[in-house]
Amino acid sequence: MSRQKLKLRSFRRGDEQLFKALVNTTYRNLETLTEERVKTLTSPPYFNPKGFFIAEKQDADAPVGCVGVFNLSAEKCFTLQYLAVRQAMSNLHVVNSLIEAALKYSASRKPKLLKAVTLTVQPYVDAYQLFGFKPVRRILRIAWDLTKIPREKRPRVKTIVAEVSQDEVEEASVVFVEGLRLYWDWYIEEGGGTRALQKMVADWMEKTTYLGAKVNDKIVGVAAVIPRAEGSEAAFSGVIVLPEFRMKRIGSALLSASLHRANQLGCKRLVVHTMAYLNSLTPGAVLYLKSGGRIEAEYLQLVREVNQRIAKN
């Protein structure tokens, strides 16, 4: 493909279906965007229409690729996502041109943090590394078949799992953030810091039913099941437990309650995105796999120095 035949343009209202089709046809069963997910992705405060690029060939009827620069919660922090190019191995110029356009847009926003998230498939990982991105961690998409829920293991301490009430939202939001410590500190930073993330989580909890694990009448862990508007699938927030209460099977109790809740809601699948190190699994990922979850896809998070010059392809 020659450079003269490639045109890049920014996202326009009405491109939602185009975005969905590009991702779904490019990744096939590895990544499937629903109408609900596309609506969320293309809405404030995370979406930048001018920073979402669509590649078109002048002699083709349909666009051939896309990539988006999305806002993170922390100020001047951005992530490149949904790099998708039809027949990417034969269209490396399109892949590189989209990344270059995204980097130029990002540079104009004077970022403090710039990262990329991509499925661990070629040639996207190589392309990001060509532009100076370095892998820092993996994200695993793990799913459970809710027709085969494993037997619950009893916690090592007396634990009661129940819905978080409106009066408990503040307490539960603190547990959520503090439970991210050690393995997910980077998420707190990208969320704008402890206070900003606590406020954001409290807003989520006002709108979504969370389960809380209580020990001696105090919440020590939380989890949420969020049914999808489309299909019989539910999203899982993952199990979050305060550091001092880990290794007591409290997470197992929360996971079991979440699996049963999703089943009661009529869902056939429960899906979570959870972090893993580059060369090993975190305890959360191990728990999910031991409890019947199966890895469906793997993503790579990469970070780029913000003052790095943009390489020409």
Image (cartoon, rainbow, N blue to C red):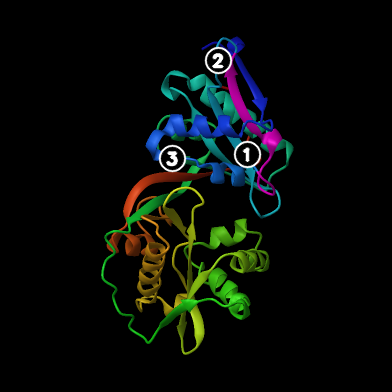
Residue type, label 2: Asp
Asked if residue 224 is positioned above or below residue 159 in the image, the reply reads: above
Q: Residue at x 59, y 68 (%)?
A: 205
Q: Residue at x 54, y 62 (%)?
A: 185
Spatial separation of the CA atoms under disc 3 and disc 2: 24 Å
Residue type, label 1: Val
Query: Which structural element holds mark 2?
Result: loop
Residue wearing tag 1: 69
Asked if residue 271 is positioned above or below residue 66 in the image, the reply reads: below
Q: Residue at x 63, y 43 (%)?
A: 70
Does the magenta segment cover residue 83?
no
Q: Which residues are magenta?
A: 43-57
Does any portion of residue 59 appear in the rendered image? yes
Residue type, label 3: Glu
Which residue sits furthest bottom? Answer: 216
Circle nearer the viewer, 1 or 2: 2
Of residues 87 and 31, the one nearer the viewer is 31
Q: Position of residue 109 (x, y in %)?
A: 73, 40
Residue wearing tag 2: 61
Circle nearer the viewer, 1 or 3: 3
Q: Residue at x 49, y 33 (%)?
A: 23
